Image: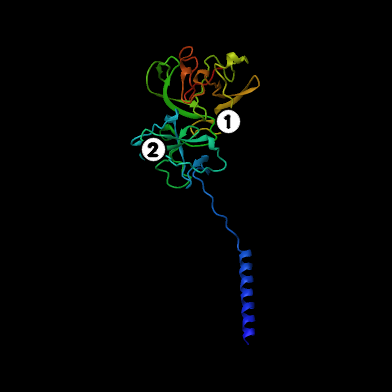
Amino acid sequence: MKFFNFSRQLVTMAFLVAASLSCSDDDPITPPVVTYDVMVKQTSLGNVLTDAAGKTLYFFSNDVDGSSTCTGGCLTAWPIFSKASPKLDPSLTATEFSSITRADGQTQVTYKGWPLYYYQKDVAPGDVTGENVGKVWFVAKTTYTVMIANKQLVGNDGKSYDSTYKEGTGATKFFVDDMGRTLYGFANDKKNDNNWTTNVEAHDASWPIYSAELKDLPSTVDKALFTTIDVFGKKQLTYKGWPLYYFGNDQQTRGLTKGVSVPRPGIWPIVNLNSPLAPE
């Protein structure tokens, strides 16, 4: 009898184990949700950088030099994004991220040299209500071809200029590339006609052309006003018909505007939303 009971117990245990294994095989395995400190998420404005919770991150046009100029009450509306050694979405490039130590001692994450912020009025993940606030705040994107900077123009002569290229102080808005490097037009150019470049390196290095594939722009910039022209086998981006250039003496340094005084003010102007159409 004892042997019979023991055998029955073994059969029962084997049945339970088999049932357990069967259920385990049938149950779908839910993979863990992977989150990153910085992600790329789809919004009504396209793909933008967000934090781990999906909250949108922003650029500030006044920060074109790479330092954070949002201080005091500004930080109430625009809190900084700070994270030590942030874990990045695999689609992002680690070398494009860094951090700065602000004047108040806080550490702020940067992307392509632009300090990153939140907007206080964004409530839900994917909100982008900070876009174009004050015409100087824009969602952070990885694929900007042109961004908007806002700062004092300072020429190669060390003098300060206003938006009319007269000596004076006050911030001017102007186009820069995704790394904050100033873009210029040439007063002697015509519509979609580059009259500067000669294909002689020593000459062209003074004003290199801006060659880029047109991708994302701030929401206030009309994509239809851009095109590309062929310049000695290279594609040069134009805006309102004006071919776009860098200034060699800016040395590819973000925020420099030395070209506005060369050879005299107005010959190589900055380009912005108020630029006139290039002449035919």
The numbered dot on residue 214 is 1
Q: Residue at x 42, y 46 (%)?
A: 123
Q: Residue at x 54, y 50 (%)?
A: 34
**Figure check: 131 above or below 3:** above
Horizontal arrangement in the rendering, residue 278 relative to residue 136 (left or right): right
* Rendered location of residue 170, percent (x, y): 38, 23
* Rendered location of residue 277, percent (x, y): 52, 21
Q: Earlier in the sequence, mark 2 or mark 1?
A: 2
The numbered dot on residue 119 is none
Task: Compare residues 260 and 219 and report the one nearer the observer.
Answer: 260
* Quadrant hosting residue 153: top left
Task: Compare residues 213 and 253 and report the one nearer the observer.
Answer: 253
Task: Compare residues 167 and 75 and report the one nearer the observer.
Answer: 75
Amino acid at pointer 1: Leu
Asked whether residue 196 is in view, the answer is no
Crowding near pointer 1: few (<14 within 10 Å), some, many (20+)? some
Dividing the image into 4 quarters, which one contains the C terminus? top right
Amino acid at pointer 2: Gln
**Figure check: 41 above or below 136:** below
Which residue reaches farthest left? 72
* Rendered location of residue 30, percent (x, y): 57, 57
Dividing the image into 4 quarters, which one contains the N terminus? bottom right
In this figure, which colouring scheme has been used for the structure?
rainbow
Q: Element under label 1? A: loop
Asked whether residue 27 is in view, the answer is yes
Q: Label 2 belongs to which residue?
A: 106
Rounded to the nearest angstrom, the CA distance separating label 2 from label 1 is 35 Å
Q: Residue at x 56, y 27 (%)?
A: 226
* Rendered location of residue 93, percent (x, y): 55, 37
